[in-house]
Amino acid sequence: MSEAPSRSVQAANAYGRFTEDGREYVITDPRTPRPWVNVISNARAGLVVSQTGSGFTWVDNSQLAVVTRWEQDLTRDSSGRFLYVRDVETGEVWSLSPAPCLPAYDRFECRHGLGYTTFRTALRGVGADWTLFADPEATAELWRLTLTNELLTPRRLELVAFVEWNCGVTPSPRREFTKLFLECERDAGRNAVFARSHMWEVGSERWGHWNTGFPYVSALACTAPVSEAEGDKAAFLGRLGSFAAPEALSGKPWPGLFGRHGDAVGALRVPIELPAGGACELGFVLATAETDEGTRELLDRFGKVEALDASLAAAKARWTNLLAAHRLETPDATFDAFLNDWVRYQAISARIQGRCGYYQQSGAYGFRDQLQDSQVWLTVDPALCRGQIALHAAHQFADGSVYHWWHPLSEMGHVTKMTDDLLWLAFVTAAYVRETGDLSILADRTPFLDDAQPVPLVEHVLRAFERVFRRTSPRGLPYIGAGDWNDGLSAVGLEEKGESAWLAHFLAGLLGEWAELFSRTGEPARAAEFVKRREVLVAAINEHCWDGDWYWRATLDGGGKIGSCENERGRIYLNAQTWAVLNDVAPPDRAAAAMAAVKEHLVSPAGALLLAPAYDRPVREIGYITRYAAGMRENGGVYTHAATWAISAAGKSKDAGLVEKLLAAIDPTRKDPEAYRAEPYVLPGNVDGPDSPLHGRAGWTWYTGSAQWLHRVVCEWVVGVRPELDGMRFDPCLPPSWDRVRMTRPWRGATLDVTVVRDEALVAGTVRVEVDGRALYGTLLPPLPAGATAKVKVSCRPA
Ligand code: GLC
């Protein structure tokens, strides 16, 4: 939405910039206000790396199966894996990323890309180019390194790679206990050190608590010959040693302590001789597999520089190909790069695959969270969304309730009194059918957690609905229990008396949608029942939940309201307004009033606030939302996830000015890093609201459900290309500064090439659609023959 007509990506700040094509973010000053990281993953393995080089590595679960140790200290940001260089002639030592030595480089760049991060440094005439990435398939983190001698004299160097083994659950506050079970071993023939743990803090039904080994073996290896290796931290650092100047970098021989009795680390010492102006190419492999043989096989597979280069090319191609089919082109190239590439990369790499960020190592699947995230697959690979739906259906109990979250590997799940989780199964299933038109998903069979008999997905969905129907107040509103979408409203309805207006809006939308679905699956009676239920619910909402100028948010077990003008704090909540609009619960006058109230009380320069004013002290009856400092996270901050829904509600209300304002407000590429602090290339979970002294400060980046939602909201409610059961709807609400947008996307086996333009010749408030040069009657395009490409021109004039 910038005024600049330029198609190249802009947005430079004091710390970095995007590359022209927007596919890399180049950090030139490592002293960013907060860590600016990359979350790199494939379907099983991953790593996080910040602009200092700090970070960690995991396989299958970023909390339960963490390979390398890391300390979550975002201020020091100096913990994890390191690569050191030592000049043998002078004894000078530095690191090839800022951590841990913080060298004053002659040249420095940290380039975060889709699937890799590269450190380009130069110091004392040694140029280094170090790229960290994960193979697209294998459980292997790979480091590709080029060292260049930029002087006119030959150089003798030593390269030292270091990791600290975790091999288990993280964080590990009982390191003195867990380290007793670690074992490390040198494999001189493979230039490698291996690590395993004989105890894993994940129980097993068969063998009991703390009585199984970590079910993986990890190894760090170098493609070049290794002169010495070390397996003990005290030997590496020296007494009271530091990572900035470890004893192992003092030129002395290494003791080489391995086995079961030390403090397990993995370090490799690699002698390097560089002729004047010469370079050397090498790499490291950090591999993890279920068995010794499996790990050895990975080391052998990636044991050559050529194999690393092929893997890096494949990792880059994977992201390019995945994101290529669905593209958006607005007048703002920076926004396009952010939305087309970074936001979807964030959703897939950090949320779906890694389930991890620098602010939170989770590893678990949130029942509602990854279901929503999986909508990112809908346009490019809907089968993956279908797979996610099946996975979540299998984490439902036969009474319709679900785990709030569960851990893959341990299958440990959390049973709560949250009341919305289960309904997201219905929500995302309906979204899948709207996109694909494929009702066969309803017959996909999965068991329940407590009943091994597989039943069709539609049965899972019905049990969820029935459970919610049973938990309804005498006046017809759903109970809120221990929270609905808002986890922090954790005490509002513990006695099952408190009601949720947001959940009522959410349910009303689903009832309408499933009524339509049932009318297509040959179940007219069920369809009619859902239509009726929706009517009754909408009537109850409008009878009881209207607060005068907006919808209140919930009632407490004790009877009071929250999100009401009767409250001093938490007087108005965002989702209670936006979802009333999105799900056609509010009659037109109330929809207009609710959106006006959003504008008056909740729109801030940082985005739409989740509620206002923030709570200023703990209120036990409401829950932990009130225990956050004022203006932080759900307590009156911009909760980006909900802020994206506000954009769809503005789009649905055809308030183009508000769409523009809200989109710009949460766009990280436009922020002043001193106030905003977090990465400019991904979305944060939250931004401090006006009741915080740090209004505008972003945090909890990467691991947020807002990434997928922003992409979807812009495509469906701003550009307005929105799948419905019977076809594709064209219903744009372009920000005033966008006069033209193009979107290409796959659709049910065909391809749509859509251009949306503003046309002042049209009657205000109308939309005109042409398909391959011919006028379409109305704005709904019926499905096309598979393989077809349709050129669609959508002309619109705002009201
Ligand atoms: C967190 C949770 C998500 C919840 C949201 C709002 O992001 O993971 O499930 O909806 O907070 O509380």
Image (tube, rainbow, N blue to C red):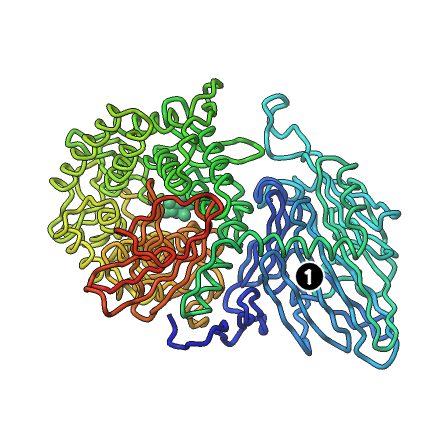
Residue 152 lies in quadrant = bottom right
Residue 309 visible in the displayed image: yes
Q: Residues within 10 Å of mark 1 (few under 14, many from 20)?
A: many
Residue 793 pos. (x, y %): 35, 60
Element class at badge 1: strand
Residue under the point 41% across and 77% down: 4
As drawn, which residue projects farthest toward the front?
774
Residue 200 pos. (x, y %): 64, 35
Q: Is mark 1 within 8 Å of ligand 1?
A: no
Report the side of 411 relative to 248 (left or right). Answer: left
318 w.r.t. 655: above or below: above
Q: Residue 654 versus residue 270: which sits nearer the camera?
A: 654
Residue 748 pos. (x, y %): 44, 43
Residue under the point 25% across and 44% down: 583
Residue 646 visible in the displayed image: no
Residue identifier under label 1: 131
Q: How many marks overall?
A: 1
Residue under the point 17% across and 35% down: 535
Residue 563 pos. (x, y %): 21, 49
Q: Residue 82 versus residue 36: which sits nearer the camera?
A: 36
Residue 158 lies in quadrant = bottom right
Q: Quadrant of the N terminus?
A: bottom left
Query: Which amino acid type is marked by label 1?
Result: Thr
651 w.r.t. 197: above or below: below
Report the side of 710 relative to 228 (left or right). Answer: left
753 w.r.t. 387: above or below: below
Q: Quadrant of the C terminus?
A: bottom left
Q: Residue 629 versus residue 410: which sits nearer the camera?
A: 410
Residue 585 lies in quadrant = top left
Report the side of 559 relative to 609 (left or right). Answer: left
